[in-house]
């Protein structure tokens, strides 16, 4: 009987090894089989980048190196305002004509503004890529910016601001940037203050286009059923009229300041808190170990159940001790800086305990994280990396963002190799550099009385141990 049981265990172990080997082989094949990203620079400086997967659908878009970071306190909000105006008609098409054309194609036209980028993109059938590129070229070069539409959109944006104010996570992260990068453009909100929205004029919008919508700062990105040579032809046809001007906008460094902001409201049932340290920029070599460390902290939500067997120590503590309703770690990167931290939602009496556990995990990352923990986090990070590139739109977005940030797209197998090369010592060294004995930044909204004062929080950023 003992012999039979032993045999079964051996078979089970061998079966697990076979499955693991098959999974590893499948993963490696997936990395190798990713189509290459091709890049062409036009004579006027526009970069055309695409990945042709042969899919029946495609996503094409314009990634422009312009966002709220390129604004001043006087025109803060103009980039987002301009994004809204893009779909309100051009010199060639009225808003109705534009909407009907997109609707009849069965396509989706969308746009968004971030702190460093403005994006316009279209998702359509592969055969409709030429029409989609022409529409994108039309809306950024020939936007009519009619006064009645500006006034109408002014009201739309003011209502959008009210919606954002009801999203407490957005509110906390805006406060986090405002206090972390106080007095700098990164501290400004993307939508801008109400007083600016009420007075932004057509001249302001035109001035922003002249200054920032220059070909040297634009990437035409495509993914899915997109032939690169055809995309380059379309770019030459529709964007050759764009010229670079002499005015080059230099990106000023944004100083980080360890600080806090608390908006106390005891009528709210839960407190929304973010705590962070200054992170690394996109091109910094420390970014990959910080991503691994971010994955080690993880995320948890009590509505999803589980937690007791979660790989994240913080998730296990949150589940077993009821420390919070949810938390998520984040690694927000910009060109030359970033914010690395944790956002959580908790009851007032649990704030101190939750914060203690977060800082305790940060100290472990800086001093005693193990190879096994790092190996698990690397596998999870690589899985998340592939899952986030599922579909033509996320791939197109990844291409556009990376071309702006790195002037190339890092191949998946190279990124995989960089993650694989991270060791526990790398994580400890990088976390010690960015976290240990550093001044944090805190943003808190809600019943925050139970949150320790800043001096005590600062004291939790290092360990004194023999």
Image (cartoon, helix red, strand yellow):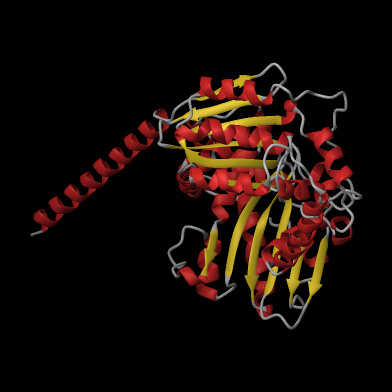
Residue lying at the far right in this picture: please name it.
74
Could you say where residue 373 lies in the image, as x and y percent from the top left? 49, 50
Classify the position of the N terminus by image quarter: bottom left
Give the left or right position of residue 129, taking residue 452 as reference.
Answer: left
Give the quadrant of residue 466: bottom right
Please name the residue shown 71% across and 80% down the image.
Answer: 268
Residue lying at the far bottom in this picture: please name it.
267
Give the quadrant of residue 458: bottom right
Give the left or right position of residue 456, taking residue 290 as reference.
Answer: right
Placement of 158 over or under 319, stated as above or below: above
Q: Nearer the viewer, residue 229 or 432?
A: 229
Q: Nearer the viewer, residue 1 or 438?
A: 438
Placement of 11 over or under 260, stated as above or below: above
Please name the residue shown 49% across and 35% down the image.
Answer: 128
Could you say where residue 56 lies in the image, as x and y percent from the top left? 40, 36
Residue lying at the far top in this picture: please name it.
43
Could you say where residue 102 lies in the image, as x and y percent from the top left? 55, 44
| Badge count | 0
Give the left or right position of residue 141, taking residue 372 as reference.
Answer: right
Placement of 313 over or under 85, stated as above or below: below
Whether residue 272 can be seen here: yes
Could you say where residue 338 lies in the image, as x and y percent from the top left? 72, 45
Please name the residue shown 76% across and 43% down the image.
Answer: 67
């Amino acid at each position: 009987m003992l012999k039979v049981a032993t045999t079964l265990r051996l078979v089970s172990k061998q079966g697990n090894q076979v499955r693991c080997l098959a999974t590893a082989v499948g993963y490696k094949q997936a990395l190798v089989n990713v189509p290459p990203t091709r890049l062409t620079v036009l004579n006027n400086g526009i970069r055309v980048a695409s990945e042709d997967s042969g899919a029946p659908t495609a996503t094409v878009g314009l990634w422009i190196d312009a966002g709220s970071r390129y604004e001043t306190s006087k025109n803060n909000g103009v980039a987002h305002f301009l994004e809204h105006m893009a779909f309100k008609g051009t010199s060639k098409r009225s808003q109705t004509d534009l909407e009907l054309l997109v609707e009849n194609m069965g396509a989706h036209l969308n746009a968004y503004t971030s702190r460093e980028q403005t994006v316009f993109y279209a998702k359509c059938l592969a055969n409709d890529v030429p029409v989609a590129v022409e529409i994108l070229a039309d809306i950024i070069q020939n936007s009519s910016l009619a006064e009645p539409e500006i006034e109408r959109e002014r009201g739309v944006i003011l209502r959008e601001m009210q919606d954002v104010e009801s999203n407490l996570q957005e509110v906390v992260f805006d406060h986090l940037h405002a206090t972390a990068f106080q007095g700098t453009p990164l501290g400004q909100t993307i939508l801008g203050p109400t007083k600016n929205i009420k007075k932004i004029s057509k001249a302001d919008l035109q001035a922003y286009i002249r200054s920032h919508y220059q070909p040297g700062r634009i990437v035409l990105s495509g993914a899915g059923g997109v032939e690169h040579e055809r995309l380059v032809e379309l770019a030459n046809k529709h964007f050759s009229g764009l010229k670079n001007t002499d005015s080059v906008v230099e990106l000023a460094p944004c100083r980080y300041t360890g600080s806090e902001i608390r908006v106390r409201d005891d009528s709210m049932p839960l407190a929304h808190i973010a705590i962070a340290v200054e992170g690394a920029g996109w091109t910094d070599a420390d970014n990959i170990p910080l991503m691994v460390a971010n994955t080690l902290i993880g995320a948890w939500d009590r509505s999803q159940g589980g937690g007791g067997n979660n790989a994240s120590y913080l998730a296990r503590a949150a589940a077993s001790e009821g420390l919070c309703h949810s938390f998520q770690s984040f690694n927000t990167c910009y060109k030359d800086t970033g914010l690395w931290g944790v956002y959580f939602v908790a009851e007032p009496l649990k704030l101190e305990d939750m914060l203690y556990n977060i800082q305790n995990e940060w100290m472990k990352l800086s001093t005693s994280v193990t190879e096994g923990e790092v190996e698990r986090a690397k596998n999870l990070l690589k899985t998340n990396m592939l899952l986030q590139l599922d579909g033509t739109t996320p791939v197109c977005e990844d291409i556009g963002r990376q071309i702006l940030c790195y002037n190339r797209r890092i191949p998946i197998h190279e990124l995989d190799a960089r993650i694989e090369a991270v060791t526990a010592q790398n994580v400890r060294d990088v976390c010690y550099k960015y976290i240990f004995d550093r001044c944090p930044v805190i943003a808190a909204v809600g019943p925050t009385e139970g949150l320790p004062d800043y001096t005590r929080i600062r004291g939790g950023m290092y360990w004194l141990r023999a």
